[in-house]
Image: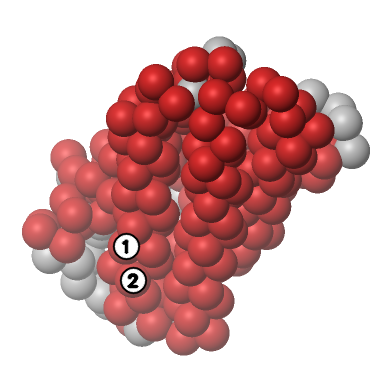
Amino acid sequence: MNISRLHSRSLGALFLLPFFAYGIGTALVTSVLNEPEHLAGQRTLFVGGALLLLLNSLFVVGIGVLFFPILRERSPGIAVAYVCTRVMEALTLIVGVVFLLCILELGDSAQGQAPLFQLLSKGNFWAYQLAMIILGVGSVAFCLSLYRSRLLPSWLPLVGAAGYGLLALGSVLELFGLPWGILFSGPGGLFELVLGGWLIARGGRTVTPSVAA
């Protein structure tokens, strides 16, 4: 099982770029939503943030696509499932962005339409939490497949499996009104940061089928 240096670095970059795209995009959108009375005057800032959130979804799909040929050699079913997981995550996040863009259409009247404003904001929140549940549940098998393939240090996929499980649990708790999502997302986020850095710096190991079996 061979991974080219370019393939490895591209995957690593795709794991790291969402932290910037989604983080900055969320910060821009939130800064505008905190002052809904000035929404119309900050359309450019809001749209810029929304575009970064959409770009994040492209990165997410790219991760699934680039990992597909790597996983397919050992676990075809998991390879397909992981691509589907990432596509579903991306689509759900896009739904959240649509809710945000609907808020933009309210303009300066957003403050005067508080119930609708709150409903659309909640829609974005629910979409994000659902996307994280999809990602968490769908990525546990992905991490276990990486563990069996020995493409990475054995501890790293195990941390990922635990981290993604906690991510899904944290989002479920958020949907029930328990604000533990950020805390529970830490291990999964750390896994993706370390994995991205590892793939860029060192790449995956070359493993023959007889050794990995």
Asked if 206 appears above or below 81 in the picture, the reply is above
- In the rendered image, the quadrant that contains the N terminus is bottom left
Q: Nearest the camera: 31 or 132?
A: 31
Secondary element at image label 1: helix
Question: Looking at numbered disc 2 in the image, what kind of residue is underneath it?
Answer: Val
Residue 68 location in percent, x, y? 36, 75
Residue 19 location in percent, x, y? 38, 34
Residue 168 location in percent, x, y? 71, 47
Q: How much space separates mark 1 and mark 2, taking CA atoms? A: 5 Å
Q: Nearest the camera: 48 or 21?
A: 48
Question: Taking 104 as reference, is 51 left or right?
Answer: left
Question: Looking at numbered disc 1 in the image, what kind of residue is underneath it?
Answer: Gly
Question: Mark 2 — residue?
Answer: 65
Residue reaching furthest to the right: 176
Cβ atoms under marks 1 and 2 closer than 8 Å: yes
- In the rendered image, the quadrant that contains the C terminus is bottom left
